[in-house]
Amino acid sequence: MTLIAPVNLLKSIPCFAGLNADVLDMLLGSARERYFSKGELLLQEGDPCPGLFVLQSGSVKLYRASLTGEEQIMRVIRPGGCFECAPLFDKGPNPVSAQALESCKAVFIPAASFNLLISNYPEVALQFVPILAMRLRDFLNTIEDFSFNTVSRRIAKLMLQLGERQDEDRHISLSVPLTQHHLACIVGCSRQVLNAYLQELIKKGIIKIEKRRIIVLKPESLLELIGHETRGD
């Protein structure tokens, strides 16, 4: 399991990378390392924001839930990723819930400590602008996908986006332990529709499922599928 030391973790994040040693020491002095088991909630949608989480190991899903319990997964956080920073600036409630997809470890900076940091070093706030802008772009891309792209194209794009480990044969393994239920919640379809499309990709030799992990055997074929649908072929 990937594990990043707290000081190296904070230095690896652009918004903290330029801070001097004294500021980093102050930040680490207020930070706490927290462990979460698989399935444990880190944040609840609608609750007050407790602070900033920076993931050291494992993976976390950020999602919204309907009154009937249906989920829409907004993002999957991997080591080195941070959440949920928006409420720290607008003082609103958590816009999403966060749940551990596997056992994980995070550096947690309480909201009061973060606000004190911003008060003493307002230039830090400017470092979060690119992060918030990037997430806005991601959100707009998600809206575009749901509005204009088919489910099959969304699934193909997702597998390429989540693919991380690549072996000597250029096979890609999904980097987070997502179930078919999770994948369906990300692309906005039923598990049955997702399973049918995955079976189609298996028959074509584009992917295989091994020990509940999806391995992309032919990434270029997924790119072709995405390109064909984009052009309307």
Image (cartoon, helix red, strand yellow):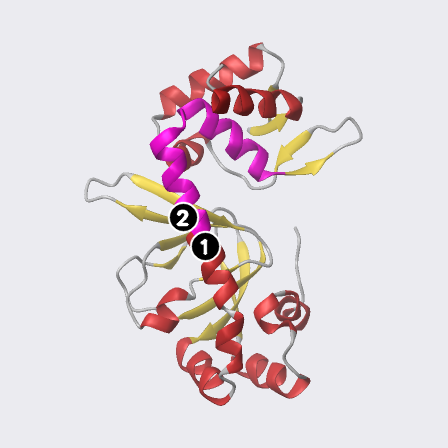
The answer to whether 218 appears left or right of 185 in the picture is right
The reply to whether dot 2 and dot 1 touch (C-beta < 8 Å) is: yes
Q: Quadrant of residue 184?
A: top left
Residue picked out by circle 2 = 139
On the image, the x and y values in percent for residue 40 come to 41, 53
As displayed, is residue 149 above or below residue 136?
above
Circle on res. 80: none
- Asked whether 111 falls inside the magenta stretch, the response is no
Q: Is residue 100 visible?
A: no
Q: Residue at x 29, y 57 (%)?
A: 45
As displayed, is residue 31 above or below residue 65?
below
- Asked whether 161 falls inside the magenta stretch, the response is yes
Q: Which secondary structure class fits the magenta region best?
A: helix
- Label 1 packing within 10 angstroms: few (<14), some (14-19), many (20+): few
Task: Provide the secondary structure element on which disc 1 rests.
Answer: helix
Q: Quadrant of residue 57?
A: bottom right
Q: Residue furthest top?
A: 203
Circle on res. 135: 1
On the image, the x and y values in percent for residue 142 come to 41, 41
Query: What is the C-alpha distance between the residues marked 2 and 1?
Result: 6 Å
Q: Residue furthest front?
A: 231
Instruction: Inspect the image, locate mark 2, and give the three-letter code of the amino acid beneath it.
Output: Phe
Q: How many marks?
A: 2
Magenta-drawn segment: 137-163
Instruction: Inspect the image, locate mark 1, and give the three-letter code of the amino acid beneath it.
Output: Arg
- Label 2 packing within 10 angstroms: few (<14), some (14-19), many (20+): some
